[in-house]
Amino acid sequence: MRVYADNNATTKVDEAVVEAMKPYFSEMYGNPNSLHKFGSETHKGVATAIDQIYSGIGATDDDDVVFTSCATESNNWVIKSVWLDQIKNGEKNHIITSEVEHPATLSACKYLEREFDVKVTYLPVNSEGTIEAHTLKDFVTEKTALVSIMLANNETGIIFPIKEMVEIAHQKGALFHTDGVQAIGKIPVDVQDLGVDFFSMSAHKFHGPKGIGALYIKSGVSLSPLFHGGSQMGGLRSGTLNVPYMVGMGKAMELAVKSFPKMNVEVRRLRDKIEKALLELPDTFVVGKENRTPNTILISIRGVEGEGMLWDLDKKFGIAAATGSACASEDLEANPVLEAIGADEDLAHTAIRISLSRYTTEEEADYLISSFKDAVIRLRGISSSYATVQAQNEAYSHK
Amino acid sequence: MRVYADNNATTKVDEAVVEAMKPYFSEMYGNPNSLHKFGSETHKGVATAIDQIYSGIGATDDDDVVFTSCATESNNWVIKSVWLDQIKNGEKNHIITSEVEHPATLSACKYLEREFDVKVTYLPVNSEGTIEAHTLKDFVTEKTALVSIMLANNETGIIFPIKEMVEIAHQKGALFHTDGVQAIGKIPVDVQDLGVDFFSMSAHKFHGPKGIGALYIKSGVSLSPLFHGGSQMGGLRSGTLNVPYMVGMGKAMELAVKSFPKMNVEVRRLRDKIEKALLELPDTFVVGKENRTPNTILISIRGVEGEGMLWDLDKKFGIAAATGSACASEDLEANPVLEAIGADEDLAHTAIRISLSRYTTEEEADYLISSFKDAVIRLRGISSSYATVQAQNEAYSHK
């Protein structure tokens, strides 16, 4: 049996999405910008895709939704172009983000610090793994150009109070960007209700293809382009339109919204079942029990190195999980969210992320539980550090 | 009958490319950066794709080939990052390009002029539609950071003397970028022989998918990233790898190289046949008869508006052609290459580009010839400007 429990890293493309894309490779292959039927026959697919995205996130007709190649592009675009528009060519000098953002946001901010002396504030998360909205009040000023804080964290699934933070940022005249990559299909998303100026998406996190994302831009908010060129997408993002993937992303969005009740009930039940079972193991901890996306568990297992655990799950049981973001997985470092929360270093190296999808079955959940428990018992049996922990515990209990 | 003769705008995805991509959507869908088998089982496809690109352009193992989302990204990346590395953080202040580059190059250069006061020289083409290498000598100095000149022009197919220009640029210590988008599969490409530092590619110009490109970076040449994030592609281009399209681009490159003999003999023969037949019409002109890609014709038909001609070919005959770059086709402007060549304004509005592919058949070529002639005769019949031209010609011949 093989179980894919790493859906926060990427997802299987839905068969219906593959079907929707297919005609746009070798049948309707014209360039949508061309002035002939081979070009214009792609327009219906493109228009449907755009409608599906608008409708999926609750955008109005006056807003812009621009397709990009990934959320890394969307995040880089917002951060670097707000720098250009509001800092280089404006009166502002400050950006606020959080310590637990995706590397795309953190690295873009660090680039601006390094190259252009932009002042960046990195808000920490509290011991619950969240950022309380009022924290923002202490940092946002009239000089703040942008606040960029994610909607749902990729590692813990914790949902941040974006709506409240948007109000605080707007009171000081700062723009607000949220990286919504982990939210689509997992929680209801309504950009109007959130009030954000920018919202980043990535199709491959909700059963669409890798290599396409989008950026929502609120009506009335301007943003310089990141790519200059043939003025596609109203000049906001040049480059020949990736028609098949646009169609695929639209379809994936439609399916994600349609599947939300299943995600919220069935997937949540499986997640809770797995979590409850794993927490029966002694010395295990889950980050952020409340207010999380319904598919995610970040669990720490004292005495078990995360990488060793991944290896066992993968090689012995055919189960795919993660120690953290796939975008940082080549470095065997402590989990940055656990570090931000303030976990001790030993514990930060023992985090395992399990992330389910609408394809996860009861059978897979049961197999995951039994395999996971087996692996923990085996690895703790050979772990000198866990032997020390146990000895200490025993000593305490005999006091 | 329908004939697609706009292959310089975009191409049909080869069925073998679609087949190659298919397993990477819903079967091998893991994130290549993930530390489990769902991730690692994609590595073989990715490695094959990389090999196919290296081999297709003659790169060495020490060079870098980085996948991007399109050539617009590749061109923007080179120009903006050379600015960062060599101008902002260096001693240089100057970029050289040509007046007939793709909008991605021209607009990126104009952005640097506008925002950062970079000095940009736009080399003109001569009356033959080309740039002679020695022209560059008069403009490149020790302060020149980058020369960016395309290998083959998208509108005329004319091949520029890049190898000679690279030598001139390198003598003055300038880096050299060539936009090779229109070259792949149409002329032999060997980046080592050309000597360029950067080479941009786009899969959808050679029967791969839209939405993926690449940038070749010569060994020993450094380039800051355009996207910051999860450090994929050795930190050069962050963002989850678009595995299906990488596999597709690799396959498309392999097929393009394999099909080159056909392109060079069969497609060239069809192109020459069409061109010869159309030039039998009076008052028609072709730009750049020598040293062109074998699939392209840019023909001017005095007295016939390019857009009217396109409309007739499309609506009456089902033939797709272009007036110029699809990336500029929404503006009904004079053809910029013809303008650069110095054609009079009337003529610059009459340009039609016909671009064939390895799928173009003899039957399609014959149908194109007869339809094109019909359309020209009909449109000239209702053209007041052409009546004037004829009357003038007649007056001269009776002198």
Image: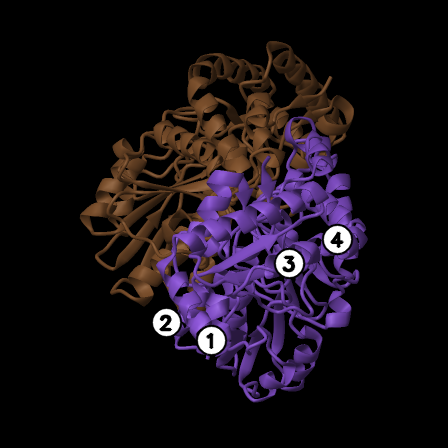
Chain colours: A brown, B purple
The amino acid on which the numbered mark 2 sits, given as a three-letter code, is Arg
Q: Disc 3, disc 4: CB below 8 Å?
A: no
Residues packed near mark 1 inside 10 Å, few (<14), some (14 to 19) or many (20 plus): few
Q: Circles 3 and 2: CB distance less than 8 Å?
A: no
| Badge 3 or badge 2: first in the primary sequence | 2
Spatial CA distance of label 3 from label 4 is: 16 Å
Chain ID of residue with mark 2: B
Do badges 2 and 4 share one subunit?
yes
Location of residue A270 in the rendering, given as x and y in whole percent from the top left corner: 53, 14
**Is B50 left or right of A337, judged from the image as shown?**
right
Instruction: Kindly identify which residue carries mark 3.
Output: B275
Task: Identify residue type, mark 4.
Answer: Met
Closer to the chain start, of discs 3 and 4, is: 4
In primary-sequence order, the first of circles 2 and 4 is: 2
Check the image and report above or below for A143 versus A98: below
**Dot 1 and dot 2 within a common chain:** yes
Under mark 3, the amino acid is: Glu
Circle 3 or circle 4, nearest the eye: 3
Q: In the displayed image of the protein, which residue is found farthest to the front?
A: B398
- Which type of secondary structure does the marked residue at label 1 adopt? loop
Find residue B263 and name its label. Answer: 4
Is residue A329 shown to the viewer in this render? no
**In whole angstroms, how far apart are the C-alphas of marks 4 and 1?**
46 Å
Q: Residues within 10 Å of mark 2 (few under 14, many from 20)?
A: few
Q: Residue B114 carries which label?
A: 2
| Subunit ID for the residue under disc 3 | B
